[in-house]
Image (cartoon, rainbow, N blue to C red):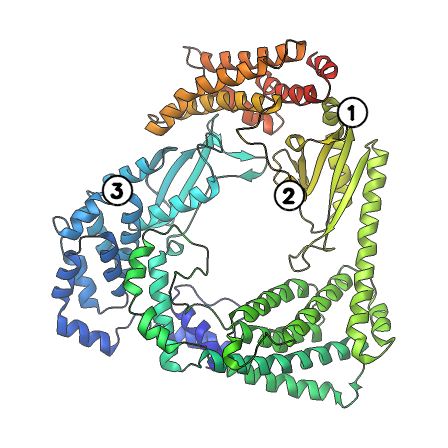
Amino acid sequence: MPPAHWPLTVNLAFLDSEPIDGLHPAIVTAVTRLHTLVDEPTPLRNELVEDVTSATIADTLLAQATPGRIAALLTACSGAPGSLIDALGARTWAGTPAGDVLASCSAEEFGNVAGVGQSLSEQIAEQMVEAAGGEDEVLRRVFARYPQMYEVGRTTDAEGSVAMARLAYVDDELTPGCDSVAVDLARLLLRSMPGCANADITTTRAGDVEYAIGDLTFGASGLLARNAITNLQVEWNRARCVLVLHELGFSTPGEHAARVASLLAQAATYFERLLILWLTERDSVGTWDWDWLTNERRRLADEADQLTAPQDGVQLFQVALPGMADRIERLLDITEAPSGHVPPDGIDGMKADDAHSVVSSITRSTTDMLAEGRIGPLPHHLGLVMQNLDDTAVAERWELAGIDTPPTELETLRRLLTDLADIAAAMFNAVIAARDVKRAARSGPNSKAVDRAADACRTATLGHFRSVIERLNTSLATAGVRAQVIERATDPHQGYWPNADFAVLVACGSVLEWTQLVEPASQAVRDARGDHHLPSTLICPVINGVREPQLAVKVQGSSTWPLNDCYYDWFPNESPNDLSAVDLPSDVQHALAAILRRSSLNYLATKRDLAESFAAAYDRTATMFTDALSRVRSYGQDEAIEAISQGLLGLAEQVDAEAADDGTLGNLASDYFDSLASKASPTAEAVVGCPLVAIQWTHDVGTAVDMVD
């Protein structure tokens, strides 16, 4: 294998899955062979286990008295001889120091340790479960960890055993982050329940239906067991990758940076000349032509393939490897980290060479896509190359190569990548003809051909965006919507096109007028967006000159969402209302929050006994409501305040009535969630109407009084 492909090849060899399409054929061949070898014990490991004996290692592991030390030793057993794995699985863990730890540790600690055990053998993990008190005891700990959980266990489907759990959504404060909670729970269960192939996690809400708004579902996960790998196992794989690469050969960080600087300079020259010939459609320019490019492409790609991974051998053998067991132990206390996370002083053996990715992408895939006319996927592809380029600028130790600042070729390549992305996007979206691009490229010195073509394409794209805005303004005017359309540029490498974003500020005289304008405004936005790939579009009412973010909506695709999360992206100097806000709309929301929380907890109470924290939160809802209602009444004695107060009291009475013989616990919260899907009910009228009247009251009391009717 060429040295630059060693890291990817070694990493793929540690994965159970088959290599993805599009990989270098030599990588696929090597990975296929390595899959048969990766779990084979090495002679050195064999000798160690034979000298120490499997029995002694097993005794040592079972004598550990902390979850971290158990996990560290178990992790290091990955790939050990079968005799050691069999010895660990055959031992009775219950009654040993390690077994006592498993019997008393937290659900997360047990999951991390048992997850490593499963990676060695299912028999080892089953011994751990038995030592912990059995699967029912393990699940009891998990159940206690999640107060919103009301069902957990093992079921079966066509694939075999499934780790199943059901959670209830109460509100964003008591049950935040439903999606991340579902994934974390799926990981925990799959690690703690040997033999389960996948998870089935669902979150429900009052009404006993899946928690969803429109076609957007929250708090669900079907995670596969093979993807529930722990951070401990990742750290061990990093270490093994680094050791393999160290044995294969490496360069010092300074040597690597020097070679990268030379390659970047050559790549910038090649890339610019490639684009000039491609854009001008000429056979030659000056002393170079397509034959020169073909030869240069092959030479540059081959030279890039000879890059070896940079490695600081002193840091590796004096710091990283000796401290690995301690890091693995510390990882027990770290929540699941994003992909690519490297612990402090850790070992990064899982990442491909960014500089090689840049040069290889330019000389291989980018050149092929241009030659074959595949310009549609180019902008996305070039965005990925740009990420590799940015990582190269940061990761390389330029100072060790005697280079004071990052090479200027980094900026040259960044400019060329951006120019080509803009050219490809404009041509693919048919806002400019290929002949016009060629005409622009040919209309001056060759050295500026790429700049001229890119400027022409950006002008065409901007003109197209102007037509989108004009169409939007026309639609808004036709619908009788007075609005201001504001615009901003977007990152050209986010994948959006035409690399711009807009928001609509709708002028209203009252809240009631906004309720009548929101749908025609949304339809105008949907029509203008068409099939463009754009960020979510904010639509916000401006009532008598004041923006009302509580009433803002966003349009994405064919849907309009009442829950808006992009207002503060547009207006970052403003901050969302918090619990300390003192105004009528906030106090109405606090009162409603107390009512809805009480009803949602009523629903959860039909599924399980409320956990202590939730029971305490339930008790506080009474005080939350009365305090908020008192503040609402303190604003005055007009008809609007009275109507809001009576509406809130009526909702509170509904919640109290849920516990009656003929009542349905959670009914009010269920009606509220239905109202988010535009399902009408008396509850929805009050839940939606009270905040609307309160917002209008802050603008004009008389109109708020009229709204009551």
Q: CA distance from mark 2 to mark 1?
A: 25 Å
The residue at 66%/57% (across/down) is 495
Checking the image for residue 47, the label placed there is: none
| Quadrant of the image containing the C terminus | top right
Residue in front for this viewpoint, 405 or 428: 405
Q: Amino acid at mark 2?
A: Pro
Write down the residue under mark 3: 138
Give the mark toward the camera: 3 or 2: 2
Write down the residue under mark 1: 509
Residue 425 relative to residue 136: left or right: right
Locate residue 673: give its quadrant.
Answer: top right
- Within 10 Å of the Cα at label 1, are there few (<14), some (14-19), or many (20+) other Cα atoms? some
Q: Earlier in the sequence, mark 2 or mark 1?
A: 1
Q: Earlier in the sequence, mark 3 or mark 1?
A: 3
Residue in front for this viewpoint, 553 or 557: 553
Q: Is residue 47 above or below residue 540?
A: below
Write down the residue under mark 2: 572
